[in-house]
Image: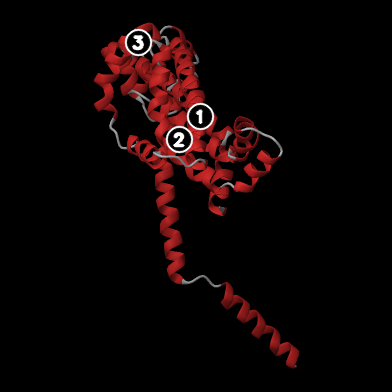
Amino acid sequence: MASETAAPVVLTRARRKTTVPAGERITGGVSQAVLIVCAAVVVLPFLWTFMSSFKTSKQVLQSPFTLPDTLHFENYVNAWTQAGIGTFFVNTLIVVGGALVLTMVMGSMCAYFLARFRFIGNRAIYLLMVAGLTFPIFLAIVPLFFILKGLGLLGTLPGLAITYSAFALPFTVFFMVPFFRALPASVTEAAAIDGAGEWRTFFSIMVPMARPAISTLAILNFVGLWNQFLLPVALNPDQSKYVLTQGMAAFAGTAGYSIDFGALFAAVVMTILPVLIVYLVFQRALSGSVVIGADK
């Protein structure tokens, strides 16, 4: 009898321990509701754009929220060829790819030097980099215009890539300096004992150890550079060298009321798709960097 009466007591105590307080349940429910609303705000417009990319202009105007009767894949062909999205896409890949490589190489080297070496002006240089995060882009448009014009880089893809990299560099250095400081100094000391120089230590040891931070910054910089609009509009007037943001604005603005909405939405999908692919491919690296940063 004693054992039979003890069992319900143990079960009751276990249930009491696993019971979630009412305040936590309310907080969890509100948080989930807010996340659902935020997800809907982000996902639903993209789904509507994707659905509209397979419609004709008449279907988009007459029944914007219904599924297309037939899938008009020619909208993607027209956007890629007639609207010039293909050319703009290639130009964007060249500019963003070049700027991203330049930013990650220069930014990681600068951050490593500021984090590992002590010299006069170290703190001042780091603070100047941080101050660059607060500098509005539009204030630098006029000086950049004349600088690039004097160097013969105005309206060129290399000039635009260098400008992109210059604006992405402060954020990269600001993010990576604390990461390099958190890495153990014993690793570099062991490399020096084995005869490795500073260049060998940086590229063979420190860069692999900083791979999570580099992956995270590559994703964030890629998204920011891909969506850049003000700099190319002001510094890239040659229409044959337009990037996607310029091409999309020109496509939507020059057609007026006779715009092909199906091709326009198809162009929007093709503009967004690379960003989604990059994020999905490197999502694990992004999550891993957050975990490693929390552990440190």
- Residue 120 % position (x, y): 41, 39
Q: Is residue 27 above or below residue 8?
A: above
Residue depth check, mark 3 versus mark 1: number of the one nearer the observer: 3
Viewer-nearest residue: 178 or 254 = 178
- Residue 292 % position (x, y): 58, 48
- Residue 277 % position (x, y): 54, 29
Count residues near mark 1 (Cα–Cα under 10 Å), then give few for <14, some for 14-19, many for 20+: many
Q: Quadrant of residue 133?
A: top left
Which of marks 2 and 3 precedes in the sequence? 3
Q: Which residue was labeled with disc 3?
A: 151
Q: Which residue was labeled with disc 1?
A: 104
Q: CA distance from mark 3 to mark 1?
A: 24 Å
Q: Which residue was labeled with disc 2?
A: 172
Residue type at the position of mark 2: Thr
- Residue 17 % position (x, y): 58, 76
The reply, left or right, for residue 192 in relation to residue 25 is right
Q: CA distance from mark 3 to mark 2?
A: 26 Å
Residue type at the position of mark 3: Leu
Residue type at the position of mark 1: Met
- Secondary structure at badge 1 equals helix
Circles 1 and 2 in contact, beta carbons < 8 Å: yes
Instruction: Give the image's coloring scheme.
Output: secondary structure
Which of marks 2 and 1 precedes in the sequence? 1
